[in-house]
Amino acid sequence: MGFVYLAALLAGIGCMLLLDHRFRLFFWHDAKAAAIVTAVGLVFLLGWDLAGIGLGIFLRGEGAIATGILLAPELPLEEPVFLLFLVLCTMVLYTGTRRILERRVQTQVAPGSSERERENA
């Protein structure tokens, strides 16, 4: 049972990438920008975790579903994988929501309106 959590995280990442691929939201929309955003987000969140660990705020809990492998004191192997999932999930949700809202605005503009009215909408 030691790899259940890691397997679930990897499955979640796979699902996010499948959604991304299907709707061309993040990596399949602009791979270079997505890689930069993902790397910056991951580094920021890992830094945040390490600062919390250093201050004694974040502690590793014992769990039967975790691997028990530590990358650093109080930093389990699953943590960077979870943070990667968090960044991917956030960006897929953000880009998907943005696309939905943009299409909603486009459909609310009357079909017979002028080009200027469409631009101001």
Image: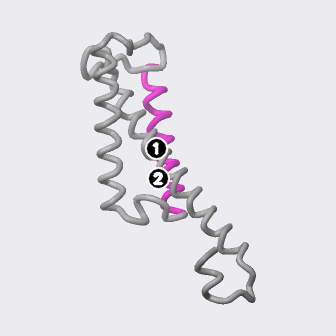
> Identity of the amino acid at label 2?
Leu
Q: Secondary structure at mark 2?
A: helix
Percent of width and height locating residue 96? 56, 57
Q: Residue at x 47, y 27 (%)?
A: 5
Q: Which residue is mark 2?
A: 17
Magenta portion: prevailing SS class: helix
Of the pair 26 and 113, the residue shown nearer to us? 113
Q: Alpha-carbon neighbours of circle 1 within 10 Å: few (<14), some, or many (≥20)? A: many
Q: Which residue is mark 1?
A: 13
Q: Quadrant of residue 74?
A: top left
In this view, 22 is above or below 6: below
Residue 77 magenta? no
Q: Alpha-carbon neighbours of circle 2 within 10 Å: few (<14), some, or many (≥20)? A: many
First to last magenta residue range = 1-22
Disc sitting over residue 59 in the figure: none
In this view, 37 is above or below 118: above
Mark 2 touches mark 1? (CB < 8 Å): yes
Percent of width and height locating residue 114? 67, 89
Is residue 32 left or right of 110 when viewed as pictured?
A: left
Of the pair 79 and 36, the residue shown nearer to us? 36
Q: Residue at x 39, y 40 (%)?
A: 84
> Identity of the amino acid at label 1?
Ile
Of the pair 109 and 44, the residue shown nearer to us? 109
Quarter holding the C terminus is bottom right
Percent of width and height locating residue 101? 63, 62
